[in-house]
């Protein structure tokens, strides 16, 4: 039996256990930087495989090494994120979230259980490769500053003892828009940087029938939100995709009351770092300038989030071809730019990295809801593919050079 068929056989054998892990994690979600029970569950599962996990990396992260022959020769890192979202689940399933208001609505339970499956496969094939795999079970992908940045600060991408620094980092993410059994790739730029914008406008409230006695922050808010769109349409190079959106406005007035202040939250996303920070300055200047011209005090805070994510072209080409060998060329999808953000981007700024998409949708079964929604779910047949494919890709990559 060749290696590919051996991996597929093990993946099929452990698929029920991977599903069970996923359902346990789905039922017991924890928010970013609070994944204590999740981390304990992961560590226990790894110890049951005979592995020795390193716990409390970036507080709630878990790292484990799987060594083959000549473990010092080369290191490849594999990453899964473990946190959940502040969403109340609407699915009526046996593994529904037990933590009201918290849900694995982005598939991190699938990423974690899949990587646990990959760990089992690799730990049973240590005679099939030279080098070391470093598996990163990473916390807090959903919240700035991102668990990836903290794990990097703690040295997960550096040489440790006789273990070489990871030459490449591979990650996968569920995508319900892709049908189960298919995998998506994109070379080069893939996901956007994402920054959070917080604006407070302070005026003088009063009776809405006497505007001349007030300094109305609501009217100024409308002007600022509209005017800031010109930063994208008139200051940006149109060849650099950019998005400026405001999704939260609080003005605690009434039909006949002008409030004293208005609070605004938004997001800015793009794919070029120089323009990113230039846009920040223009957003600040325009906000403060318009407010001052209208007699309103403005404060603005832009929290710098994740950088853009770039897939190393050579690594991605290799993984794409090996994926074709594993599931067939007909099951590969070419991905478009996706302006969501991911803290996997931090890894991609340091090492050769590839972040690919695992198809988890199934229209026939009604599994179509997008991530970050209360009805998100996956076709669990994807877990067998996810665990086996990553093991296959990891071994192929570690054998390169």
Image (tube, rainbow, N blue to C red):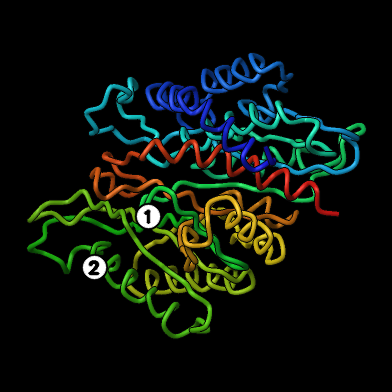
Name the residue at the front extreme.
1
Q: Position of residue 145 (x, y in %)?
A: 58, 44
Q: Dot 2, how many residues are within 10 Å of its Cα: few (below 14), some (14-19), or many (20+)?
A: few
Q: Quadrant of the N terminus?
A: top right
Tell me if label 2 and label 1 are in contact, CB under 8 Å: no
Residue at mark 1: 265
Going by the image, does 237 lie left or right of 215? right
Q: Nearer the viewer, residue 235 or 73?
A: 73
Q: Is residue 149 above or below residue 83?
A: below
Going by the image, does 126 lie left or right of 366? right
Q: Position of residue 130 (x, y in %)?
A: 85, 39
**Residue at screen point 82% across, 32% down:** 68
Q: Quadrant of the C terminus?
A: bottom right
Looking at the rendered structure, the secondary structure element under dot 1 is strand
Q: Dot 1, how many residues are within 10 Å of its Cα: few (below 14), some (14-19), or many (20+)?
A: some
Q: Is residue 74 above or below residue 288?
A: above
Q: Position of residue 312 (x, y in %)?
A: 69, 62
Mark toward the viewer: 2 or 1: 1
Number of numbered discs on residues: 2
**Residue at screen point 34% across, 70% down:** 224
On residue 228, the disc is none
**Residue at screen point 44% across, 85% down:** 234
Residue at mark 2: 219
Q: Spatial distance from mark 2 to mark 1, Cα to Cα? A: 16 Å
Q: Quadrant of residue 288?
A: bottom left
| Mark 2 vs 1, N-terminal side | 2
Q: Position of residue 329 (x, y in %)?
A: 53, 61
Q: Is residue 25 above or below residue 275?
A: above
């Amino acid at each position: 039996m060749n290696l590919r068929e051996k991996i597929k056989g093990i993946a099929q054998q452990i698929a029920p256990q991977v599903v069970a892990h996923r359902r346990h994690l789905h039922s017991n979600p924890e928010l970013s930087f609070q994944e204590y029970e999740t981390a304990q569950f992961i560590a226990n599962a790894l110890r049951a495989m005979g592995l020795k996990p390193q716990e409390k990396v970036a507080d709630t992260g878990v790292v484990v090494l799987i060594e083959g022959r000549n473990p010092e020769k080369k290191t490849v890192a594999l990453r899964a994120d473990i946190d959940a979202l502040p969403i109340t689940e609407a699915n009526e399933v046996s593994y529904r979230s037990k933590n009201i208001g918290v849900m694995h609505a982005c598939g991190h339970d699938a990423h974690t259980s899949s990587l646990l499956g990959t760990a089992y496969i690799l730990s049973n094939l240590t005679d099939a490769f030279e080098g070391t795999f470093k598996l990163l079970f990473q916390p807090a992908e959903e919240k700035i500053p991102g668990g990836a940045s903290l794990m990097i600060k703690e040295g997960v991408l550096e040489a440790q003892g006789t273990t070489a620094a990871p030459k490449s980092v591979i990650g996968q993410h569920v995508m319900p828009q892709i049908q189960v059994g298919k995998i998506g790739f994109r070379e080069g730029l893939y996901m956007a940087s994402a920054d959070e914008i917080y604006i407070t406008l302070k005026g003088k409230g009063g009776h809405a029938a006497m505007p001349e006695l007030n300094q109305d922050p609501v009217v100024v808010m409308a002007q600022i939100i509209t005017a800031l769109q010109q930063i994208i349409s008139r200051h940006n190079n149109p060849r650099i995709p950019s998005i400026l959106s405001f999704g939260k406005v609080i003005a605690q007035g009434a039909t006949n009351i002008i409030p004293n202040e208005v609070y605004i939250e938004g997001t800015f996303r793009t794919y070029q770092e120089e323009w990113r920070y230039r846009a920040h300055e223009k957003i600040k200047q325009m906000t403060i300038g318009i407010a001052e011209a209208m007699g309103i005090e403005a404060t603005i805070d832009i929290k710098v989030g994740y950088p853009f994510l770039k897939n190393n072209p050579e690594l991605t080409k290799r993984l794409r071809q090996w994926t074709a060998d594993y599931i067939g060329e007909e099951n590969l999808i070419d991905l478009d730019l996706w302006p969501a953000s991911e803290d996997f981007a931090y890894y991609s700024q340091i090492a050769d990295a590839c972040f690919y998409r695992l198809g988890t949708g199934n229209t026939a079964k009604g599994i179509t809801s997008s991530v970050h929604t209360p009805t998100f779910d996956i076709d669990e047949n994807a877990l067998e593919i996810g665990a086996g494919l990553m093991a296959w890709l990891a071994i192929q990559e570690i054998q390169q050079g």
